[in-house]
Image: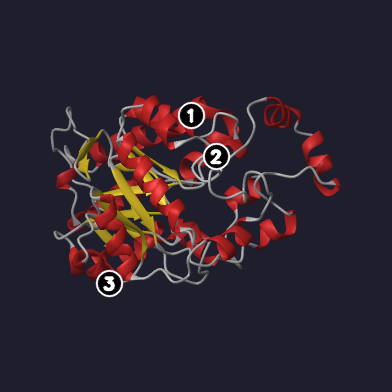
Amino acid sequence: MFDYIDGAADDELTKRRNTAAFSDYDLVPNVLAGVAQIDTSCTIMGRRSALPLMLSPTALQRVFHWQGERAVAQAAEKFGLWFGISSLATVSIEEIAGLVSTPKLFQLYVHKDAGLNSSMIERCQAAGFDALALTVDTIVSGKRERCQRSGFTTPPRFTPAALWSYATRPRWTADYVLRERFRLPNLDSHVQEGTGKAVSIAEYFNTMLDTAMDWDTAARIRQDWGGTFCLKGVMSVGDARRAVEIGADAIMISNHGGRQLDGSRAPFDQLAEIVDAVGGQIEIICDGGVRRGTHVLKALAQGATAASGGRLYLYALAAAGQPGVERALGLLQDEIERGMRLMGVTSIDQLDRSMLRTR
């Protein structure tokens, strides 16, 4: 389970770059700015957020902790943040919609089964989700070697090779065996894979997802959805411009946490180039590698609307469920507030490139 969260593609170079990229820039503070009162809030895709931070959609959360997406949703609501659920979520669209009022994003994988795609979009419309994010960088799976070595599948299998791991983690094993049955409720009315049939994530992506997806597909999904629309996985200026052309409201600059094309750039490294090309025409969310509040501030100073990430809360979810996620978000909030004060900033919109220097 840990290797699924922590691991990435091939040599995991890109995964390491995602966080290391922030270290190549220094923050330039301003002093004597009167920072007794600061405002950390901002507007993301038309909804107010208490912090310039989103919790990115991630799959299979009840594998890591029995509370799964419920814990993340409730922690996000407590902190007033956007959060997303994956097509491969382990809690249904409808339950999440009824559980919290915080802004919600649904991350869509385009499957070969057109009926399944339509079903998920229609369910999100009926449930009142605030935005749809089409993931565009997973038409085939990256080579996740840690998962290949461990034999990780969804749902997890009790194999002889894994028996010792399960036996030495009795609480996780008891939660998995004795609590509600593991399923992928946004998919299992159409496909067995991932719920009734154990498969690796690589096998799922390579057999179930539509490799023919193109810009016409994205434009059609935006039209079918009819609401706030985001493309997740944009990493080039050309693709950012095409996103503007099809009428997307936002893009998430993302390399899927380094889990797809190893050797690609970090989102933060690519941010300035994309901001210079399409900033002001579309919202730009820097997704990936965020581990500190100062990473969020650097992304905003470079021109991002907000920052987002998945691992920043997944480690905490796996460790302690909802209290763990709340602890992680509390640390990030504290770091953002402290960083703003030390930089002489009283509101998010005061962050700009004058406060950054390349190392």
| Along the line of sight, the residue nearer the viewer: 355 or 257 | 257
> Hey, which residue is sitting farthest bottom in the picture?
238
Which quarter of the rendering shows the C terminus? bottom left
| Along the line of sight, the residue nearer the viewer: 24 or 282 | 282
Q: Which residue is mark 1?
A: 71
Sequence-earlier tag: 3 or 1: 1
Q: CA distance from mark 2 to mark 1?
A: 9 Å
Q: Which residue is mark 3?
A: 237
Amino acid marked by disc 1:
Ala
Q: Classify mark 2: residues with Cα within 10 Å, few (<14), some (14-19) or many (20+).
A: many
Which element carries disc 2, helix, strand or loop?
Answer: helix
Sequence-earlier tag: 2 or 3: 2
Residue 284 visible, this angle: no
Q: Is residue 179 left or right of residue 72?
A: right
Q: Is residue 91 left or right of residue 282?
A: right
Q: Which residue is mark 2?
A: 61
Residue 277, picture quadrant: bottom left
Give residue 233's position: percent from left, percent from top: 38, 61
Amino acid marked by disc 3:
Val
| Along the line of sight, the residue nearer the viewer: 214 or 48 | 214
Amino acid marked by disc 2:
Gln
Rendered position, 65 above or below 290: above
